[in-house]
Amino acid sequence: MNYKVNRKGQEIFSSGNPLNDNLKKKILSIDGVTNVIKDRQAVFARITSSKTSSGIAGMCDIITDEKFSEIQDYLIEGKMPTDSNSILVAKLISNHFPEIKVGSKVNLILDKKSITVTVSGLYDHLKVTNGHDKLATDSTQFFAPKSIFDKAFPNIDNYNYSWSVVIDPEKEKSVEKALDNIVAESNNLSLDKFKEQVEYEKMVNDVSFGGLQILSWLIFLFGVINLINTTLSNQISRKVENSILRSIGLTEKQLYKMYVTEGLCYLFAATIVTVIVATPISIVACRKVSTAAFAGRVLPYQFPIFDMGLFVLVLFILEFVLATWSIRKYRQQSLIEQMQSRE
């Protein structure tokens, strides 16, 4: 179980970052805490350009030795900063602001200090991890070398933004209580509990996928209505033809069998077309949705066996009901009346 201790407010840098060695020792002294991982070194920043004078705000993380390889792996364009005048910008920002691209000159504003820097590269912000997971509102929007931070804050050397506290699951409650007490002692600390994040994500996913489930049932309903309309229209248009066949010896049993056979042909055709056409579309949609919902992670596609089986069963029953209803309608009219009927 991970707990995250987050520094609130860039202004407390000058008065001393509470995420320091003393706090680390205090947390490690709690019975049940096995490790404290320093996730991020970051500050709140803005970048401006000639066309974005209002600025684009977000978290700017330091490119540490531990994060260098991961950031480089998810670099989309350009290269890693090689000097103290270059930064990386999330590709998403470049998509919305085309003037911010590799080679562009922008103003990086840290606190109230503006530093002119060059965008050396663009990275995929959904794949680069940080201390608050990939989908959090404070996900990393910029990366910069520590030397840039030192220009803006020459008297500060501690830029810790968040830690992950690894605990023994069997001592979760006691550790949680101890961490709550530590956070309560400072106005500049907050505790981000992993289990609460999981519950929140579950709620969001339930709402999102619940909406997609309702949409799928609506499509199913329209499909059933369309099949009923097609079957009935076909039977009505062939009323005279069927009555002529009956006049030359077609029995009621044979007519019923013909209706059922035609209905089964509709059923199998609809099933085959659905599987052949819809499955590739579903696989692509699954990749797109999972990539957006789970920060770049592609979930394996699972064929909806239950839903498809229910679809086939409903159509199967429906065709027999329609065939029975059509036969009963024919029984209500004499053969001569059927032959004289016109559309």
Image: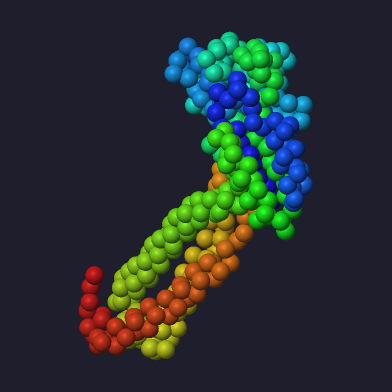
Residue at (53% x, 51% y) in the render: 200
Residue 43 lies, in percent from the top left, at: 60, 25
Q: Is any atom of residue 118 visible in this view?
A: no
Using the image as rendered, state which of residue 276 and residue 41 is in the foreground.
41
* Quadrant of residue 109 within the rendered picture: top right
Residue 202 lies, in percent from the top left, at: 55, 54
247 with respect to 262 (left or right): left
Residue 103 lies, in percent from the top left, at: 61, 14
Q: Quadrant of the C terminus?
A: bottom left
* Quadrant of residue 230 within the rendered picture: bottom left
Q: Vertical placement of 44 versus 180: above or below?
A: above
Residue at (63% x, 15% y) in the render: 153
Report the colour scheme.
Answer: rainbow
Q: Is any atom of residue 26 visible in this view?
A: yes
Q: Vertical placement of 327 versus 149: above or below?
A: below
Residue 33 lies, in percent from the top left, at: 74, 47
Residue at (63% x, 42% y) in the render: 182
Using the image as rendered, state which of residue 160 and residue 105 is in the foreground.
160
Q: Vertical placement of 212 versus 100: above or below?
A: below
